[in-house]
Amino acid sequence: MVRDYNQESKDNDERKYTYDFDYSVMHPLMLRTFEPLFVEGGMLELGSFEGRFTQLLLPHFSNLTCVEASSEAAEKARRALGADVTIIEGLFESVQLPTTYDNIVLTHVLEHLSDPVAVLKRINDEWLSDRGRFFLTCPNANAPSRQIAVKMGLISHNSAVTPGEREHGHQITYSLDTLERDAREAGLKVLLRSGIFFKALANFQWDRLLQTDIISKEYLEGCYQLGQLYPDLCSSIFLLCEKG
């Protein structure tokens, strides 16, 4: 089956491809989680979309390369980022990269891949340097917002892929155990398991709340810190890996 990555990245009747919650809350908190763990050297971002998270990475890396499958998203990223970033349009399954990288990030992308283990194996075998670190995050099947949706009858089970997610190219909904399973199968060594942001509301609900004064910075900070205590109840799950 030939996939249309431009079409997959468009909003559909059930859900948006990206939410304000992603950009204003989750992206800064992902960077905050990753930053103390970065090592000196270059950065490879796999799945940069339109470059919003790339912009947060830029101040930390002078050598930044991105790979993006959607031609439309790659072009928007080029316009937004300019010559400071090398953007390669291509598929992870077939793209040829010129070197290895000391830092690689894959944020909310693995669940879109038809063969995630094969791509993780390429990261381990071909792209991650011997001293490098791989930062892997995915949406969490066990986030309270999803568990509540199950109890409401909106989805059948925590790890279900909804029709709207399927239109966006989702193939799987990971939990910590299945994410680590695939990382280990690909040969990666898992150094750290964690979660980012305790989340009991759906993204569209967060978008509405963030337009009001109901949610304070202190509340967001509390959800971030609570997520470190209960990673299995977070919006995103996170693995830090090294070459196996």
Image (cartoon, rainbow, N blue to C red):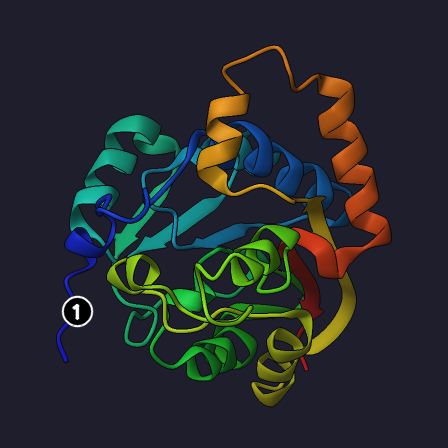
Query: Going by the picture, which residue comes out furthest to the front?
Result: 152
Crowding around mark 1 (Cα neighbors within 10 Å: few <14, some 14 to 19, many 20+) is: few
Using the rendered image of the protein, determine whether residue 113 is visible from the camera's viewpoint.
Answer: yes
Please determine whether, in this image, residue 242 is positioned above or below residue 58.
below
Q: Give 47 or 98, whichever is nearer the viewer.
A: 47
Query: Going by the picture, which residue comes out furthest to the right?
Result: 229
Q: Is residue 129 left or right of residue 127?
A: right
Residue at horizontal 52%, vertical 72%? Answer: 157
Residue at horizontal 30%, vertical 57%? Answer: 164
Q: In this view, does 57 lie to the left or right of 50?
A: right
Please determine whether, in this image, residue 138 is positioned above or below residue 126.
above
SS of the residue under disc 1: loop
Residue at horizontal 55%, vertical 37%? Answer: 27
Q: Which of the 4 image quadrants contains residue 151? A: bottom right
Question: Quadrant of the image for the C terminus?
Answer: bottom right
Query: Going by the picture, which residue comes out furthest to the top?
Result: 213
Q: Give 42 or 220, whichever is nearer the viewer.
A: 220
Q: How many numbered discs sit on the rendered protein? A: 1
Question: Quadrant of the image for the N terminus?
Answer: bottom left
Residue at horizontal 34%, vertical 69%? Answer: 92
Residue 47 % position (x, y): 38, 54
Residue 225 % position (x, y): 82, 39
Residue kind at label 1, given as amino acid type: Arg
Residue 197 % position (x, y): 69, 43
Using the rendered image of the protein, determine whether residue 139 is visible from the camera's viewpoint.
Answer: no
Please determine whether, in this image, residue 139 is positioned above or below residue 131.
above
| Tag 1 residue | 3
